[in-house]
Image (spheres, helix red, strand yellow):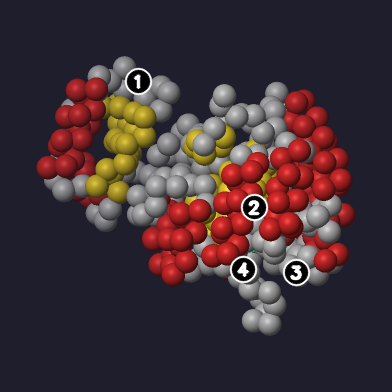
Amino acid sequence: MIVVMNHNASKEQVQSVLKRLDKEGFQVHISEGESRTIIGVIGQNTKEILPKLAIQALPGVEKVVPILQPFKLAGREMKPDDSVFQVGNIVIGANDVQVAAGPCAVESREQILEAAWAAKQSGANILRGGAYKPRTSPYSFQGLEEEGLKLLAEAKEETGLAIITEATDTSNLKIVAEYADIVQIGARNMQNFHLLKEAGKLNKPIMLKRGGNATIEEWLLAAEYIMSSGNNQVILCERGIRTFEVATRNTFDLSCIPLLKHLTHLPVFADPSHGTGNWKLVPAMARAAVAAGADGLMVEIHPCPSEALSDGPQSLTPENFSIMMEDIKKIANVLGRSVGNSSD
Ligand code: PEP
Ligand code: MN
């Protein structure tokens, strides 16, 4: 249920509603919007109990209504205004398009530094790179693990880029969170509920990638696991789903971007690299994602894609990435947006 306060409700009136709900033992989530405060009352049987408390009779309360969406905290009903997160001086979820770029996996100092400088020079301000890699085959390169995290830290120190990197398990979540500015949870772990709950205890943005066979509702319920454990800073990232089509690695679900912007207040990123699996398709899908309203992109780049230890076929060279960035800047500008602006 949500308690919608009047747009001119005073702080005291909000407090007295909170006090009343607390007395009844309810857990509440407060959303202070631009025009009004909404109090989410989440739990079982709220629908039966709340009407009996006559909350709607308290001063400053406009109405008490059920949340119809199954994803209570992630949905727009609970929080009509967009969620905006600050990562260092980067603002995610506001008007500007943010770009994370880097190799699929951190492979060596030279490789990650070269990729980081290429990302920065073209206007990205987040460096991606996996240190713990969730590979389909146990015989494929599994990542440099902590050594990879240290190399990411070095690249951050040199370039000033923020870091996003993946935690594949609760056993590496803590160390990943020490190095990462944004912790990535990959497609294969989207419904690893234990990992999601642990990520919900961090005070750090979590990028939750869409599972390869997940519906949008399942994805938002996965975000709900993180949020209901205490962390509201969730970024969704579309990375393609598995369909009958095998001409591309995955089917990039472009329409989920405007649909998610309608359903949820959380920022939405798009990853056209995993979404297509083919570097030649990446720039076009990056342009399309920006045009469709994505808050950001995550793109794989490699100094020498043909030598990449993972995902070379979908990685852009620094030159092609630079061309892609120029194009998305033009598209963003037409829509009154910029690429990669920071708060300073
Ligand atoms: C990645 O971003 O490197 C990755 C493994 O992506 P996904 O989880 O979307 O497959
Ligand atoms: Mn990859």
Which circle, 2 or 4, is nearer the viewer? 4
Q: What element carries label 2?
A: strand
- Does label 3 or label 2 sit earlier along the sequence? 2
Which circle, 4 or 3, is nearer the viewer? 4
The amino acid on which the numbered mark 2 sits, given as a three-letter code, is Arg
Q: Is residue 332 left or right of residue 98?
A: right
Q: What element carries label 3?
A: loop
Residue occupied by mark 4: 144
Q: Indicate the quadrant containing the N terminus: top left, top right, bottom left or bottom right.
A: top left
Q: Is mark 2 within 8 Å of ligand 1?
A: yes
The amino acid on which the numbered mark 3 sits, given as a three-letter code, is Leu
Residue occupied by mark 2: 128
Q: Is mark 4 on a helix, strand or loop?
A: loop
Asked whether residue 217 appears in the rendered view, the answer is no
The residue positioned 73% from the left and 36% from the top of the image is: 123
| Residue that lies at the very extreme toward the top in this rendered image | 8
**Neighbour class for label 1 at 10 Å: few (<14), some, many (≥20)?**
some
Q: How far apart are marks 4 and 1 (CA)?
A: 52 Å
Residue occupied by mark 1: 7
The amino acid on which the numbered mark 4 sits, given as a three-letter code, is Leu
Q: Distance between the residues labelled 1 and 2?
A: 41 Å
The amino acid on which the numbered mark 1 sits, given as a three-letter code, is His
Q: Say if 184 sits above or below 338 in the image.
A: below
Q: Say if 286 sits above or below 222 in the image.
A: above
Q: Distance between the residues labelled 2 and 4?
A: 14 Å
- Does label 1 or label 3 sit earlier along the sequence? 1
Q: Tell me where residue 268 appears, x and y as whole percent.
A: 59, 44
